[in-house]
Image: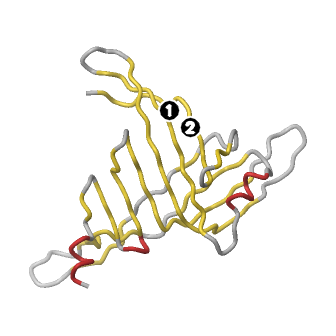
């Protein structure tokens, strides 16, 4: 058994183009389930029940180190944006107390929702941001797709189980 200790490094790709040195950090989106309040006879109050496989809007924000051509590779009005983050991380092996290595990959497909060119200040870094509204989201840990959410095709795979497979067959 091992557990992750640190991200050694990562790259961001727009399609197949590697965007070198464009960002230091990317906050991955939260997955908040759409819920429905349930109440009635025999229920003491209300319970918010998640709608299986349905999630609120998810955004990912990429911070860039200033205005570069790389920003405009993904800033496509009316077109989908395809981004991949590939990261290498270090692990600690419990049994042997040795350091191991592993990897993760995050893919998003969506639409540019916001572009903020940032501000210009003498002797300081410039940060521009692009916010993408996500239609497709994949998290791969060491070759295992642990989350795959395809909102436009009603597909939601969590730990290898497509929780919407039955629902798609019913409709």
Image spot of residue 62 (x, y percent): 63, 52
Q: Name the residue at 50% across, 38% down.
A: 87
Vertical comparison of 152 with 89: above or below: below
Kindly indicate the quadrant of the structure image that contains residue 171. bottom left
In the image, what residue occupies the spot 20% across and 81% down? 39
**Location of mark 1 (residue):** 7
Q: Residue at x 27, y 52 (%)?
A: 159
Q: Is there CB contact under 8 Å for labels 2 and 1?
A: yes
User: Which is closer to the viewer, label 2 or label 1?
Assistant: 2
Residue 18 placement, left or right of 163: right
Residue 49, placed above or below residue 11: below
Q: CA distance from mark 2 to mark 1?
A: 8 Å
Q: Position of residue 43 (x, y in %)?
A: 13, 77
Q: Position of 118 compared to 165: left or right?
A: right
Q: Is residue 91 left or right of residue 162?
A: right
Q: Quadrant of residue 150?
A: bottom left
Q: In which quadrant will I find the N terminus?
A: top left
Secondary structure at badge 2 equals strand
Structural crowding at the residue carrying mark 1, measured as other residues with C-alpha within 10 Å and reported as few (<14), some (14–19) or many (≥20): some
The secondary structure type at the circle numbered 1 is strand
Residue marked by disc 2: 10
Q: Position of residue 26 (x, y in %)?
A: 57, 47
What residue sits 41% from the left and 31% below the top? 102
Coordinates of residue 14 in the picture (x, y in percent): 62, 53
């Amino acid at each position: 058994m091992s557990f992750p200790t640190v991200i050694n490094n990562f790259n961001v790709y727009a399609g197949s183009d590697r965007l070198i040195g464009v960002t230091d950090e990317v906050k991955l989106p939260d997955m908040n389930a759409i819920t429905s309040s349930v109440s009635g006879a025999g229920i003491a109050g209300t319970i918010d029940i998640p709608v299986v496989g349905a999630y609120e809007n998810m955004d990912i924000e990429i911070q860039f180190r200033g205005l570069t051509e790389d920003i405009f590779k993904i800033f496509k009005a009316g077109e989908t944006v395809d981004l991949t983050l590939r990261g290498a991380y270090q692990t600690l092996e419990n049994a042997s107390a040795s350091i191991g290595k592993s990897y993760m990959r995050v893919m998003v497909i969506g639409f540019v929702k916001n572009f903020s060119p940032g501000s210009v200040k003498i002797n300081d870094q410039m940060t521009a941001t692009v916010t993408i509204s996500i239609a497709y989201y994949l998290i791969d840990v060491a070759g295992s797709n642990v989350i795959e959410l395809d909102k436009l095709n009603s597909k939601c795979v969590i730990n290898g189980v497509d929780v919407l497979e039955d629902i798609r067959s019913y409709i």
